[in-house]
Amino acid sequence: MEEIKTPIHVAIIMDGNGRWAKENNLPRNAGHRKGTKTLETIIKHANQIGIQYLTVYAFSTENWNRPQNEVDGLIKLFRKYLDEHIKKAPREEIRFNAIGDIFSPNIPKELREKILHLQEITKDKKGLCFNMAFNYGGRDEIIRACKNIASDIKLKHIDCEMINEDLFSQYLDTGHQPDPDLMIRTSGEIRTSNFLPWQLTYSEFYFTTCLWPEFTIEEFNLAIDEYKRRKRRFGKSE
Ligand code: FPP
């Protein structure tokens, strides 16, 4: 029998924080706070079951258009997450990595410094790689990759003939990482919303109506079990 493999890379669109807050008569930021707790639980569990990469959509390039008070609440949560994990880093196994345009002037300087600091002090960790997609947009990532390729051609570091799928992938924020095997989206929305458009080409998709703040280890395991039942053909026949 074919060995049933745990996915190497799981990507998640953590959707439904706002609806959860509304259902519970709470402000939207309370949904994001509860969502952060869910995320902490899932990161820990994913690491324990041997997943090597977990990429989550934490803040998109479009999320700046939300009401200022919600954006401020989210930024506060990221700052808190970074501060706590900078403190805990010596005792942790998780490698932290941000994807997205973290050098954009939209991002407060001290937040960017914390992101870079947490990346630096966890870069040799042997556990799960946690990719936080922050100020991330898939089309924006592809355009930034194209600009960097054009600049490297101009500097004669590469030439046009060398461009192929492998080389292009290396210019994306996920660099040398494998593409996600499985993409989970919570809250019942069935779309990918500019999340990893290049990398998700052959990923298995799993949609659940569960709202992100209520997502549990059991729900996560259901997605993994469903993934294990899928037959992946990558465009080939049986
Ligand atoms: C989508 O729900 C969720 C977001 C835009 C933010 C996700 C962020 C977190 C869970 C927390 C932060 C992560 C870290 C690393 C601290 P929504 O608000 O669009 O929900 P709705 O569709 O029900 O309104």
Image (cartoon, grey):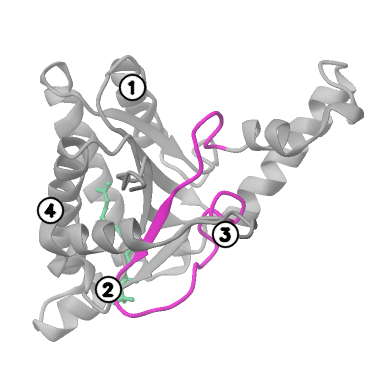
Residue 157 is at least partly visible in this image: yes
The residues bearing labels 4 and 3 have C-alpha atoms spaced at a distance of 41 Å
Sequence-wise, the earlier of marks 2 and 3 is 2
Sequence-wise, the earlier of marks 1 and 3 is 1
Residue at image position (13%, 69%) is 214
Q: Amino acid at mark 1?
A: His
Callouts 2 and 1 close, C-beta under 8 Å: no
Residue 37: mark: 4
Sequence-wise, the earlier of marks 4 and 1 is 4
> Which residue has dot 1 on it?
117
Sequence-wise, the earlier of marks 2 and 4 is 2
Q: Amino acid at mark 3?
A: Glu
**Element under disc 4:** helix
The residues bearing labels 4 and 1 have C-alpha atoms spaced at a distance of 22 Å
Residue range in magenta is 173-201
Callouts 4 and 3 close, C-beta under 8 Å: no
**Element under disc 2:** loop
Sequence-wise, the earlier of marks 4 and 3 is 4
Q: Measured along the vertical axis of the image, is residue 118 above or below residue 199?
A: above
